[in-house]
Image (tube, grey):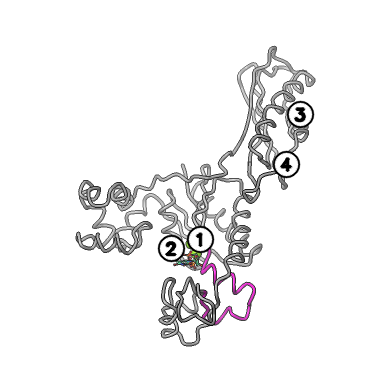
Amino acid sequence: MTIVIFIDMDYFFAACEELRHQELKSIPLAVGTAKESEKYRGVIQTCNYVARKFGVRSGMPTTNAYRLCPNLTYLESDDKYYSDISNKIMQLLRSYNRKIEQMSVDEAAMEVIELNYDESYLLGMEIKNKIKNEIGLTCTIGISFGPTFAKMATDASKPDGLMIIKEEDIHNFLKDKKISKLPGIGPKTEQRMMELGIKTIDNLAKYNPILLSEKFGYVGLELHALANGIDNKKISDKNDRLSIGRERTLNVDTSDINELSKMIDILSNEVYNEILDGNYWFKGIGIKVKYSDFNFVTRNKHFNNNIDSLNTIKSTAVALIKPLIKNDVKIRKIGVRVFAINKIGGQKKL
Ligand code: TTP
Ligand code: MG
Ligand code: MG
């Protein structure tokens, strides 16, 4: 089963400002595009939840925001500062060594393949706590079987929330919602759908898909599928070289550590060459051992720091294989692999 854990930071730009101006925490605060001296010309990018109580929203002209909330504190946005914090958050998420797609400056989708919903909930809570403790900000987490529904779970439980939508709950979750709640339906598409009499997600689900594809192209079909509870988009991780490995059958089955070490040397060198080619770092080394009776075992070692050394691959693989050597059954095949691969901050090694 694939589950997606979706993370979106709460009132991100304004929350970053609160982090360095604690005194702004309990008063209405907005961040916008214009300089403070020219604020009446700009638009609001985001605001804290105190300001939202007055009706202030993203995209609203700042003049309108002041009309709704005369005591609003306004700050000009500082993109460099927000993107530094965003990078720290993404790095924290990457430390879980799972497939991650960053969707925007403040959101990412993480794929978990071996966890059930209860386990995903615990992981979600752990991520929330870690972001709170290490970055100092709150986020909201949505968990579902696809990235779009996980995002919708996030939207529905903001701020500082965590919500799960399972397969059996999706139709109830969707059916009475306005179509604008579906990610991908902006004001224009919403308007065109309204003209066809499509107001709720349930209306969309029941609409003729052929007519939808005529009016909206492929997107129309995708939206129709979503409205019917189908969300099978895959997460695409641009650092997706999750592991690099080599395995080979020995010329003669053996339990001799010297023979096994020779093969580990060969495999490690091959893996290492690929690491050099891609300018990768990694945080895990693993081996696989297949015995003459065709049983096999795998062993992994995780590191806290990034590794890029050939010697570490070799010595770790040898250390991992030693306890697996048996007297009664010989080893037939060995694999060496490195995993949790990344290019830190997208930068290449020199
Ligand atoms: P969002 O995640 O959409 O919003 P948010 O984090 O401010 O609030 P929420 O708690 O509802 O998630 O956007 C992330 C940041 O992107 C936001 O803090 C500011 C910026 N942004 C704009 O610059 N313009 C916009 O119209 C929107 C929606 C966001
Ligand atoms: Mg956000
Ligand atoms: Mg966002």
Mark 2 residue element:
helix
- Left or right, 41 with reference to 307: left
Tell me the residue that label 4 is attached to: 307
Tell me the residue that label 1 is attached to: 8
Q: On the image, which quarter does residue 125 sit in?
A: bottom right
Tell me the residue that label 3 is attached to: 318
Tell me the residue that label 2 is attached to: 155
**Against 91, is 155 above or below?**
below
Residue 1, horizontal then vertical, whole percent: 46, 42
- Which kind of residue does numbered mark 2 sit on? Asp
For the residue pair 35 and 338, the one nearer the viewer reads as 35
Ligand 3 within 8 angstroms of badge 3 C-beta:
no
Binning the other alpha carbons within 10 Å of mark 2 as few (below 14), some (14 to 19) or many (20 upward) gives some
Q: CA distance from mark 4 to mark 2?
A: 38 Å
Q: Mark 4 or mark 3: which is in front?
A: 4
Ligand 1 within 8 angstroms of badge 2 C-beta:
yes
Binning the other alpha carbons within 10 Å of mark 1 as few (below 14), some (14 to 19) or many (20 upward) gives many
Q: Which tag, 4 or 2, sits closer to the chain's start?
A: 2
Q: Mark 3 or mark 1: which is in front?
A: 1
Ligand 2 within 8 angstroms of badge 1 C-beta:
yes
- Left or right, 119 with reference to 169: right
